[in-house]
Image: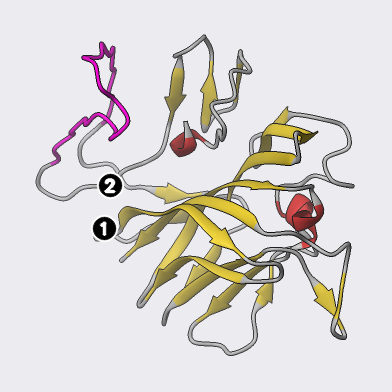
């Protein structure tokens, strides 16, 4: 589910965009991620560590040879490859920063999934920061977590599934825990780097030493897809 932007096993369906979607319950996941390859490709499925019984899967894979890959209207180099970086269930202290993606060379940011659990939703004040080409100062991709995923006011209108971004799970405090998950694509607003890249998310935010809506400790899972060449 996290590979498709869905956290906390959210069962909401049907919904979908040209990038990804969920049409059934419990399955029906699809995506149209462009995965470039050179001379060959191998597709492997493996059960997760929590699976203890045999499972049945129905898979469909589609592709074409000798076709250029585009990110939006940008043609990617022939040696571009799509890589996934995962951070699973990381414990963050209030205001702590987490590098959710890093690259030493050239490439472009493609897709981000973020899933967070905390006492409340105050962690949503945290900004998304991109450090391009070794820069010490970040490019701020948002003024808070919800507006990075194109939401407003702590996602006060509930779930949505749009081409560029979507809120796939929102859970108000229950038994002392709030949860959210969302996805974001960068094909129509590219983030491209030439000499290294770092993408960082912060558990809450502060200004002049004073936290906005003081955050609590949080558990964070992130999936970030990068094209690198």
**Residue 12 percent across, percent down from the top left:** 63, 18
Label 2 sits on residue: 36
Which residues make up the magenta segment?
41-63
Above or below, 4 relative to 122: above
- Crowding at dot 1, Cα within 10 Å, few <14 / some 14-19 / many 20+, comes out as some
Residue displayed at 79% across by 48% down:
121
**Residue 72 percent across, percent down from the top left:** 53, 49
Relative side of 22 to 12, left or right: left
**Residue 179 percent across, percent down from the top left:** 68, 39
Residue 54 within the segment the image draws in magenta: yes
Residue 98 figure quarter: bottom right
Say if mark 2 contacts mark 1, CB within 8 Å.
yes
- Crowding at dot 2, Cα within 10 Å, few <14 / some 14-19 / many 20+, comes out as many
Residue displayed at 72% across by 40% down:
177
Residue 94 seen in render:
yes
Residue displayed at 37% across by 41% down:
34
Which residue sits furthest left? 39
Which residue sits furthest bottom? 136
Residue 78, label in figure: 1
């Amino acid at each position: 589910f996290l590979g498709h932007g869905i956290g906390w096993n959210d069962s909401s369906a049907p919904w979908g965009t040209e990038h990804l979607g969920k049409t059934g319950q419990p399955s029906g996941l699809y995506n149209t991620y462009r995965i470039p390859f050179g001379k060959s490709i191998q597709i492997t499925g493996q059960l997760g560590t929590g699976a203890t019984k045999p499972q049945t899967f129905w898979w469909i894979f589609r592709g074409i040879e000798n076709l250029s890959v585009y990110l939006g209207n940008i043609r990617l180099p022939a040696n571009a490859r799509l890589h996934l970086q995962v951070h699973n269930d990381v414990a963050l202290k209030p205001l702590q920063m987490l590098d959710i993606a890093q690259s030493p060379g050239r490439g472009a940011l493609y897709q981000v999934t973020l899933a967070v659990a905390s006492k409340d939703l105050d962690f949503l004040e945290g900004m998304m920061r991109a450090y391009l080409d070794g820069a010490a100062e970040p490019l701020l991709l948002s003024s808070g977590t919800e507006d990075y995923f194109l939401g407003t006011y702590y996602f006060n209108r509930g779930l949505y599934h749009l081409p560029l971004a979507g809120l796939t799970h929102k859970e108000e405090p229950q038994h002392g825990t709030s949860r959210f998950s969302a996805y974001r694509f960068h094909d129509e607003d590219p983030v491209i780097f030439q000499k290294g890249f770092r993408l960082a998310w912060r558990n809450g935010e502060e200004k002049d030493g004073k936290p906005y809506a003081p955050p609590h400790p949080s558990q964070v899972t992130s999936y970030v897809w990068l094209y690198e060449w």
